[in-house]
Image (tube, rainbow, N blue to C red):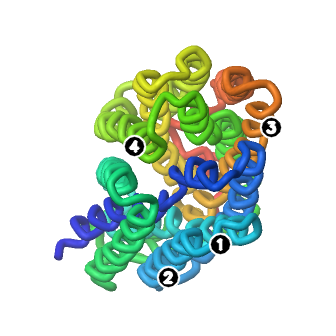
Amino acid sequence: MNPVYALEGLNFFMADVQAGIGPFLGVFLQAHGWHPESIGTVMTLGGIAGMLATSPAGALVDATRHKRGIIVIAGVMTTLASLVLWVSHGYWMVAASQIFTAVTGAALGPAVAGATLGIVRENGFDRQFGRNQVANHAGNVVGAALSGWLGWRYGFGAVFALAGVSGLLTVISTLLIRRDAIDHDSARGLGRSTPAEPNREHEHASGFRVLLTCRPLLLLAASLAMFHLGNAAMLPLYGLAVVAAHEAEPSAFTAQTIVVAQLVMVVAACFANRLIHRIGYWGVILISFLALPLRAMAAAMFIAAWGVWPVQALDGIGAGLQSVAVPALVVRLLRGTGRVNVGQGVVMSLQGAGAALSPALGGVLAQHFGYASAFLVLGAVSTGSLALWVLFGATLKKACGVNPMRASGAIKA
């Protein structure tokens, strides 16, 4: 099979593995007597574990020549950790499952990004990663729709079964990528930029200090951390709010929230590259940051089954644009360093720090002040990402147009 087609199949099936029972976890635990604060706390434990694991996972992806093996192992272990929840839903079992899911799943993002870069090289990365994200969001749509229907028709057990099938298909898709299709030097940001270029003596990877001296990378990561501090709790809290108001059936409504967002993400990912060429990475990411405060206001005003359309459509715009623009920008910033995947991991870690704290913050606010207040506070928090992105706009715009590390001589030739 053409490795590009196998890669897109991997992204399609991996979507349900990464999400797994996650989107349904809140309503699943609520059905077993859990309160919003406890649900938020256990999600935060998983988020912290994932945050701590992502950077080391990125370093491992840079160092290893077994990227397919990492994807297979992470996919299998993530699936098994999700399935444990069907056996037991006591607090510590759920917490252990969330931690294990987050740790094993932390390797999937950098590994798939590295494999993509190794297959299509830097010049083809933006376009191919956009196609990957279209496939991934489409997989989320199909997975969520099937999960919602199966959960409504057969109960939550069918949702777990679907996660297991998705894990198996993820492994098969990964093994269909030929081992020799991945150039491991290109996969970490070294070596040939296109498959047609003649062989040349490879550059040496820079030290890890290069990550700390790339100011635009740190600004990007900090902005994303604040964005996800406000964003991560929105979906589970909105599902809880509508279900608690007896406005919808839990499984079907949770599936609907995901399907609406992912359908918009498919469209956003399709147009992301064109938008990047027209207004640049800085402008695209700015638009994604603007969507969240609007989403928070919509969530606070419309706690009803129909409110899913404006609330999740805005989520789709922000997440869809970021899913293409952020990894592509990291590749641009760190080209030639040999540290591209650990750079992806650093960005994901700081992003994960915000996402990890968000459910606990949202859960406490919802339990003590109500859901509407929680949404407004989370939206206010997210404006920090806008402030940082605009305040350092001059530096970031320059970095988005040229490779600042090479220009400053920070990269070892």
Q: Which residue is mark 2?
A: 73
Q: Which residue is mark 4?
A: 252
Q: Residue at x 35, y 34 (%)?
A: 264
In the rendered view, tell whether residue 4 sits above or below residue 139: below
Q: Secondary structure at mark 2?
A: helix
Q: Quadrant of the C terminus?
A: bottom right
- The spot of residue 330 in percent (x, y) is 54, 50
Q: Secondary structure at mark 4?
A: helix
Query: CA separation, marks 1 and 3?
Result: 24 Å
Amino acid carrying label 4: it is: Ala
Q: Residue at x 63, y 55 (%)?
A: 32
Q: Which residue is mark 1?
A: 100
Q: Secondary structure at mark 1?
A: helix
Mark 4 surroundings within 10 Å by alpha-carbon count, few (fewer than 14), some (14 through 19), many (20 or more):
many
Q: Secondary structure at mark 3?
A: helix
Q: Quadrant of residue 320?
A: top left
Residue contact between numbered discs 4 and 1, judged by CB atoms under 8 Å: no
| 300 left or right of 318 in image | right
In the rendered view, tell whether residue 404 sits above or below residue 5: above
Amino acid carrying label 2: it is: Ile
- The spot of residue 22 in percent (x, y) is 54, 56
